[in-house]
Image (cartoon, helix red, strand yellow):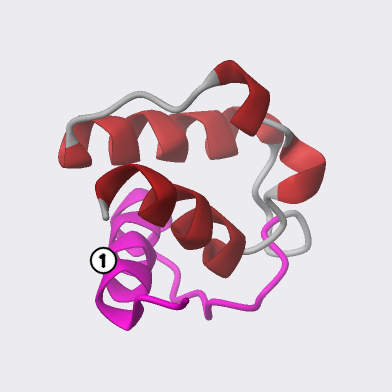
Amino acid sequence: MRNRRLEAKIAELAREKTGKELTETENLKESGWDERGLVALMAWIEERFGFFFDAEDLQAEKLLTLRDLSELTEKYVI
C-alpha cells in the first residue's frame, strides 16, 4: 500500500540533500545518486523517523527509486 504523505516527505528530504526535485519513480542512479548518497539519505531517514533499517533491507539493487525507499520506510514507521 502506498503512503503518499511518506513518499512526499522522503522526496522533500532528498530535495533538501540535493537541491533537485525528484519524482517517486525517477531512477536515483540515473539522477546522479551514487551509493554513498543513497546511504546518506537512508541515514537521514533513520534519524528523521527514529528507527534503523535492518541490514538485509539495505540492498542498493532493490532501492532504485524514491518510491522503493518510501515503501521500505513504510515497513518501519507504519
Q: Which picture quadrant has residue 74?
A: bottom left
Assign the C terminus to one quadrant of the image: bottom left
Q: Which picture quadrant has residue 25?
A: bottom right
Q: Nearer the viewer, residue 17 or 4?
A: 4
At label 1, the amino acid type is Lys
* Mark 1 neighbour density, 10 Å: few (under 14) some (14–19) many (20 or more): few
Residue at 18% over, 40% down:
48
Give the image location of residue 9, x and y in percent.
Answer: 26, 66
Q: Which residue is mark 1?
A: 9
Specify whether residue 12 is painted magenta.
Answer: yes
Residue at 38% over, 71% down:
7
Instruction: Please provide the residue range marked out in magenta.
Output: 1-28
Give the image location of residue 6, x and y in percent.
Answer: 30, 67
Left or right of residue 34, residue 54 in this image: left
For mark 1, give the secondary structure.
Answer: helix
From the viewer's perspective, is residue 50 above or below residue 14? above
